[in-house]
Image (cartoon, rainbow, N blue to C red):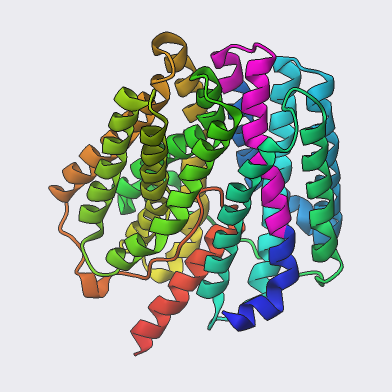
């Protein structure tokens, strides 16, 4: 871990600052939308646009980097993020915000792709897993810490948007001043979605459902807080609780993942997430209950992302694992786009509890489908399963590829041994 820090500290520092800004941005938009009297469904469209941009960038940015290079793309996308952030308070209109969120989602995904390429280039086969874990911890810590910045100024003014813009701008300095250009991307022929589904139906269905769960947390938690008349500090703590849960429970669940039938673990973890959402449905008016529900939902849903990747890899030859990554990301992205839209529609009809109702339904659906798949195919023996590599649901294609490369390395070593 020390060697990873010594080689990548500038990149990790820059990403910490960037995630401070992105974490604050998502929450601030949700709170400011309530101040501007946007409807819940209008806000769901605004929030969904981020994931449309994110998914689009995952397809387009790699080709852009091949043409003009990492540094130019990184600097250009960062400039766009800073500029768009200033537009939000200047033009408080749902259409303008939707376009702004789409651009920011595209740019953040592109920035992640470049940063994670540098991370991968600086990692070796011996420390790739540690580098990815440390990177994910920094991401989560930045988002959690960003929630505290919501309290430093009035969300109805300009100051917080300026703070985010400054954080994003500063974040590029340590990265650009210390990183050398990485090698060009190597093209990987992806598996078709039909091939991927045949290999792992649970991986595909689970990724789609989980995309809706994660985007609901990331996009609509602050909207829920504003609709539930939470105070500013309570909204900040509520949003942070999802990511604190993810950091605390990611590695214990990963430990179990390498020691038991993964389908059993997927069904248990998703059922616990559904139960936590059920508690939120009936207890959302109690703030301590809200915090507990958010902690458990985040703690269950975020590790599920890595768990589903590991489960899918169990049914793939290790030379196909990297090829499967783009398909998994695409399926997850489709679910992420739909999540805020469904939550917004349900909240408009059933009130704030609709936020937990959607998350609980998605997690419950994943539980039922995991149990069903256990009746359709024999399990993989624990000693024959691949490695669990922690990956954040907000990961770009590069981070997912790093995880798959790590799994390939381990699988190859075990085969040789």
Q: Position of residue 58 (x, y in %)?
A: 63, 47
- Name of the residue lying farthest toward the bottom: 417
Q: Is residue 67 visible?
A: no
Q: Position of residue 51 (x, y in %)?
A: 59, 35
Q: Quadrant of the C terminus?
A: bottom left
Find the magenta span and give its range.
15-44
**On screen, 107 above or below 352?**
below
- Name of the residue lying farthest toward the left: 375
**On screen, 322 above or below 356?**
below
Nearer-the-camera pick, 98 or 298: 298
Give the left or right position of residue 368, taking residue 100 as reference: left
Nearer-the-camera pick, 279 or 191: 279
Nearer-the-camera pick, 13 or 210: 13
Magenta-colored stretch includes residue 105: no
Q: Residue at x 36, y 44 (%)?
A: 296
Q: Residue at x 72, y 51 (%)?
A: 18
Give the left or right position of residue 24, taking residue 72 as reference: left
**On screen, 174 above or below 245?**
below
Q: Residue at x 48, y 20 (%)?
A: 228
Q: Position of residue 393 (x, y in %)?
A: 50, 49
Residue 26 placement: quadrant: top right
């Amino acid at each position: 871990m020390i060697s990873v820090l010594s080689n990548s500290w500038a990149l990790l520092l820059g990403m910490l600052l960037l995630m401070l800004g992105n974490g604050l941005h998502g929450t601030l938009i949700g709170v400011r939308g309530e101040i501007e009297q946007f409807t819940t469904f209008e806000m769901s469209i605004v929030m969904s646009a981020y994931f449309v941009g994110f998914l689009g960038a995952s397809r387009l940015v790699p080709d852009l980097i091949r043409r003009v290079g990492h540094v130019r793309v990184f600097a250009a996308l960062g400039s766009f993020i800073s500029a768009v952030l200033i537009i939000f308070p200047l033009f408080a209109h749902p259409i303008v915000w939707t376009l702004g969120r789409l651009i920011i989602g595209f740019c953040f995904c592109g920035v992640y792709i470049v940063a994670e390429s540098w991370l991968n280039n600086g990692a070796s086969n011996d420390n790739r897993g540690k580098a990815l874990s440390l990177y994910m911890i920094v991401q989560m810590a930045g988002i959690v810490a960003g929630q505290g910045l919501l309290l430093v100024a009035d969300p109805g003014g300009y100051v917080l948007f300026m703070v985010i813009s400054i954080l994003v701008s500063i974040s590029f300095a340590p990265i650009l001043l210390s990183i050398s250009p990485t090698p060009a991307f190597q093209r990987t022929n992806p598996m078709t979605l039909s091939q991927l589904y045949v290999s792992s139906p649970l991986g595909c269905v689970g990724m789609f459902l989980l995309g809706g769960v994660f985007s609901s947390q990331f996009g609509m938690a602050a909207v829920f807080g504003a609709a539930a008349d939470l105070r500013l500090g309570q909204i900040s703590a509520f949003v942070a609780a999802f990511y604190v849960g993810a950091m605390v429970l990611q590695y214990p669940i990963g430990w179990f993942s390498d020691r038991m039938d993964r389908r059993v673990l997927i069904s248990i973890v998703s059922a616990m997430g559904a139960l936590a959402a059920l508690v939120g449905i009936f207890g959302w008016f109690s703030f301590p209950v809200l915090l507990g529900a958010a902690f458990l939902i985040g703690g269950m849903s975020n590790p599920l992302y890595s768990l589903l990747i590991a489960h899918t890899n169990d049914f793939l030859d290790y030379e196909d694992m990297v090829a499967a990554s783009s398909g998994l990301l695409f399926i997850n992205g489709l679910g992420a786009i739909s999540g805020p839209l469904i939550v917004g529609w349900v909240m408009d009809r059933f009130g704030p509890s609709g936020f937990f109702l959607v998350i609980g339904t998605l997690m419950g659906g994943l539980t039922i489908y995991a149990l069903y798949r256990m009746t359709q195919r024999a399990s993989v023996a624990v000693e024959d399963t691949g490695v669990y590599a922690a990956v954040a649901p907000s990961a770009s294609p590069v981070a997912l590829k790093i995880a798959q490369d790590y799994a390939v390395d381990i699988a190859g070593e075990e085969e040789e041994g």
